[in-house]
Amino acid sequence: MILSFLTKSVPNIASILGLVTISNLLLINSVDAFSVTFENGGFESEIVGSQNGWNTIGDVTITPTIDGIAPLSGSNQAIITTGYIEGTYGDPVGNRNDDSSNIFNQSSINPVSADTNPNADNLQEHFGLSSDAFSIDRSSGIDSAFGPRTSKEGSGMYQEFSVTLGSGEDGFTVSFDWSYLTNDGSNSTFGEQDFGFWSLGQVNGTTYNTAFDGSEDGLPNTNEIAVLQSSSGTISSPTGNNNYVTGFDYSTNGRYSHTVSGLSEGTYTYRVGFGVVDVDNLESTSALLIDDFNVQEVPFEFSPTAGIALVLGFWGCDRLRRRMKIKDQVSSCTK
């Protein structure tokens, strides 16, 4: 009687155990759900100043299609430029128009100083970076006696977001689409000039700790920022407003992602930033376009070992069920 009951129960028990195992494997990150708080990742709402999640400085706003480059989704994308327009300004220098008086500024707010002088590092201070954070290496083959690139002015934006990791989770992935436009190029003496960059770091109170390790996905960086694109090639003059000489569009650059891992269960605050910097001179505008910013949990990866164990478990349960069924039949025949 007991043996017969067990024989009939084994398949049910095996099925239940299998379902439990599969549930644990597939839903391990759902027990303590991953959560993240950020705003306006598609840049459909204005971002000048401190609006809709983003904190900006210099020439930063949103735009529809510009110079032939359209948003990848929705109606707008973020644009950050070094375009300077004539007016009475004390920062960073004098009174001028860039790019042979062609206008590339988008917000009517001028870029700010990005000098390595701690008293004039307005852009670095905005991000919480050190004064020499933008002092990236010059092009290969350029005389090292010139030192790193000299940042002059720039614009940028950042947003702080909170990430909560549950049991079994150890990180998250930041992703975004970007494009770079420039009227600058390579100087025969000083090499590549302006650049667009991004930054990522953890915020603890008033302390900001970069998430980069010095070799950020093969991109040139200073541990605090990673360069997305530098101005290179032949320098020439633009022919009209918002008509950039060189453009690296989304189809060229594609989607960029970076994963932060090795974290413990808990809630963390991170700051992500984007910007563009004038190098060595101030006369040529460069711009960085950003769209579809997102933060997601690290995708679940099915373990081959766990899969084999699961298959063997089902196979063992089936073998046990068959053996017990045979014994039950033999027992019935001998009665």
Image: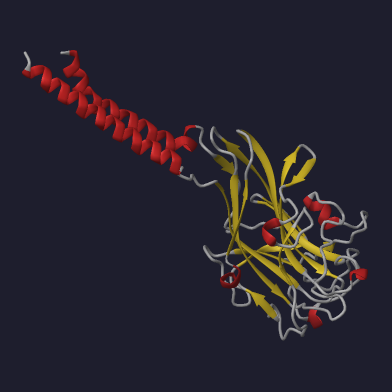
> Could you tell me which residue is drawn at 49 percent across and 37 percent down?
29
In this rendering, position of residue 76 left or right of residue 107: left
- Between 155 and 327, which is closer to the camera in this rendering? 327
Whether 51 is drawn above or below 182: the answer is: above
Q: Quadrant of residue 193?
A: bottom right
> Could you tell me which residue is drawn at 37 percent across and 36 percent down?
310
- Between 87 and 42, which is closer to the camera in this rendering? 42
In this rendering, position of residue 324 left or right of residue 92: left
Q: Quadrant of residue 7?
A: top left
Task: Quarter of the image for the N terminus: give it.
Answer: top left
Question: Where residue 185 appears, x then y in whole percent?
Answer: 77, 78
Question: Where residue 114 appears, x then y in whole percent?
Answer: 85, 61
Whether 329 is drawn above or below 304: the answer is: above
> Could you tell me which residue is drawn at 77 percent across and 85 percent down?
237
Task: Quarter of the image for the C terminus: give it.
Answer: top left
Q: Quadrant of residue 205?
A: top right
Tell how many labels: 0
- Res 205 visible: yes
Which color mode does the image show?
secondary structure
Question: Where residue 281 appears, x then y in whole percent?
Answer: 86, 73
Question: Where residue 194 appears, x then y in whole percent?
Answer: 78, 70
In this rendering, position of residue 28 left or right of residue 291: left
Whether 271 is drawn above or below 234: the answer is: above
- Res 40 visible: no
